[in-house]
């Protein structure tokens, strides 16, 4: 059967669909039990946020069209994969003060399961040394940009539900960047595949950075949870992270006042550069894995924030083009995407939600096979070239 597409948004011709519901009743040749719903949220800080809610028959999740095509909490049966942010979102970008003088305004809208950081920059805030003005806000702007163009495609032959979007991040006289994304899931599957293209809209060369900030908390994250990664090299970001180096891959129970710890990794891949990182609970009965290519995304960050549940008990497992240091520092290290005039770069990520001990074991075995090719190098202190002063 032929694929069927619905155009939800296209600012170039004024297309806008406020509400859409699609199911197997609307597309012949597809199994029962799946659905796609597009709606616009009303009330509070979420007022005006557009979301596409997908249920593939087993896995459900949302795509936030108004927030850079970020992903909301995923669910399989009674199991959820996300976190409980003290920010009750999704928050419309109009309520997120990105250019607040502290550079930390991005945190006012942070509650997604997966949000992209970029495209101009994706790390810590940075300020002009002479004027003191903010140069780069925390984690960049793309996660608070609405999509300019969005469509939904159901393909009975491929067995897929796909949402495609275009998000533009431009400033006159400065950067002119664009994110083109297709987010796909298969009927009855436990995975989400993200295929991104970062495009330079300028006739001059450009640079970009992208970080996939994937966030998980209770109930997946608990005392004894563990990150399982095929490590090439690992470095603590600062002295505080170094104090926990012996347990960098393990998590403790919620502890009010816990100060975050961050670790920078390079991961081993197969002959094609493909790798996988696993986060599992203490009993190895539930987990999530990220699969990606190390040539496109050579850096990986682990953010541990095991503070009180009420304050945001969460970890971030984050493949990226760079580490989330200040933009200038990362540029000095060459950790940027170099884009030719009107050029582009392809990135990708597959998120698998593991709802059984068998699935967790299989993922752990895949990681072990990658690690078997080399011994990890784990540094006990921050290192020059990895960690900004």
Image: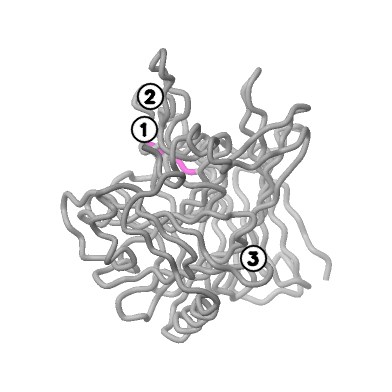
352 in relation to 180, above or below: below
Between circles 1 and 3, the one closer to the viewer is 3
User: Residue 203: percent from the left, percent from the top?
Assistant: 78, 27
20 in relation to 208, above or below: below
274 in relation to 5, above or below: below
Q: Residue at x 72, y 31 (%)?
A: 205
Whether residues under marks 3 and 2 lie with C-beta atoms below 8 angstroms apart, the answer is: no
Query: CA separation, marks 3 and 2?
Result: 39 Å
Q: Is residue 219 left or right of residue 279?
A: left
Element at label 2: loop
Q: Residue at x 65, y 62 (%)?
A: 184
Query: CA separation, marks 1 and 3?
Result: 34 Å
Q: Which residue is mark 3?
A: 273
Q: Quadrant of residue 274?
A: bottom right
Pointer 2 local density, CA inside 10 Å: few below 14, some 14–19, many at least 20:
few
Which of the two discs, 3 and 2, labels the residue nearer the N terminus?
Answer: 2
User: Residue 29: percent from the left, percent from the top?
Assistant: 76, 75
- The magenta-colored residue range is 41-45
- Seen from this angle, which residue lies furthest right? 2
Q: Is residue 227 left or right of residue 368?
A: left
Which of the two discs, 1 and 3, labels the residue nearer the N terminus?
Answer: 1
- Seen from this angle, which residue lies furthest top? 131
Q: Quadrant of the N terminus?
A: bottom right
Whether residues under marks 2 and 1 lie with C-beta atoms below 8 angstroms apart, the answer is: yes
Q: Is residue 44 magenta?
A: yes
Element at label 3: loop
User: Residue 157: percent from the left, percent from the top?
Assistant: 78, 73
Q: Quadrant of residue 109?
A: top left
263 in relation to 87, above or below: below
Q: Which residue is mark 1?
A: 104
Q: Is residue 377 left or right of residue 165?
A: left
Pointer 3 local density, CA inside 10 Å: few below 14, some 14–19, many at least 20:
some
């Amino acid at each position: 059967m032929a694929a069927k597409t619905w155009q939800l948004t296209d600012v170039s011709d004024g297309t806008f669909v406020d509400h859409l519901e699609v199911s197997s009743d609307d597309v012949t040749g597809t199994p029962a039990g799946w659905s796609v719903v597009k709606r616009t949220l009303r009330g509070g800080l979420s007022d005006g946020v557009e979301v596409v809610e997908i249920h593939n028959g087993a896995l459900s999740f949302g795509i936030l069209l108004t927030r850079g095509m970020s992903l909301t909490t995923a669910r399989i049966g009674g199991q959820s994969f996300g976190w409980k942010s003290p920010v009750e979102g999704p928050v419309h970008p109009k309520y997120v003060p990105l250019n607040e003088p502290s550079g930390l305004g991005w945190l006012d809208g942070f509650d997604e399961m997966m949000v992209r950081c970029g495209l101009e920059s994706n790390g810590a805030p940075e300020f002009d040394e002479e004027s003191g003005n903010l140069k780069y806000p925390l984690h960049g702007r793309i996660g608070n940009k609405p999509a300019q163009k969005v469509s939904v495609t159901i393909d009975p032959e491929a067995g897929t539900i796909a949402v495609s979007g275009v998000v533009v991040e431009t400033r006159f006289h400065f950067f002119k960047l664009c994110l083109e994304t297709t987010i796909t899931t298969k009927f009855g599957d436990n995975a989400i595949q993200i295929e991104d293209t970062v495009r330079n809209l300028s006739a001059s060369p450009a640079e970009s950075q992208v970080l996939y900030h994937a966030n998980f908390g209770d109930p997946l994250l608990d005392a004894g949870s563990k990150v399982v990664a095929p490590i090439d090299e690992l470095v603590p970001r600062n002295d505080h992270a170094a104090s926990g180096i012996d347990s960098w891959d393990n998590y403790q129970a919620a502890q009010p006042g816990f100060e975050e710890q961050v670790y920078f990794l390079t991961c081993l891949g197969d002959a094609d550069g493909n790798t996988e990182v696993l986060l599992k609970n203490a009993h190895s009965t539930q987990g999530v894995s990220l699969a990606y290519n190390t040539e496109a995304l050579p850096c990986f960050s682990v953010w541990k924030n095991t503070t009180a549940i009420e304050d945001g008990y969460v970890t971030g497992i984050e493949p990226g083009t760079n580490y989330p240091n200040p933009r200038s520092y990362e540029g000095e290290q060459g950790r940027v995407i170099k884009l030719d005039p009107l050029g582009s770069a392809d990135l990708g990520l597959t998120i698998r939600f593991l709802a059984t001990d068998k699935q967790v074991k299989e993922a752990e075995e895949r990681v072990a096979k990658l690690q078997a090719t080399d011994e990890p190098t784990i540094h006990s202190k921050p290192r020059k070239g990895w960690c900004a002063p």
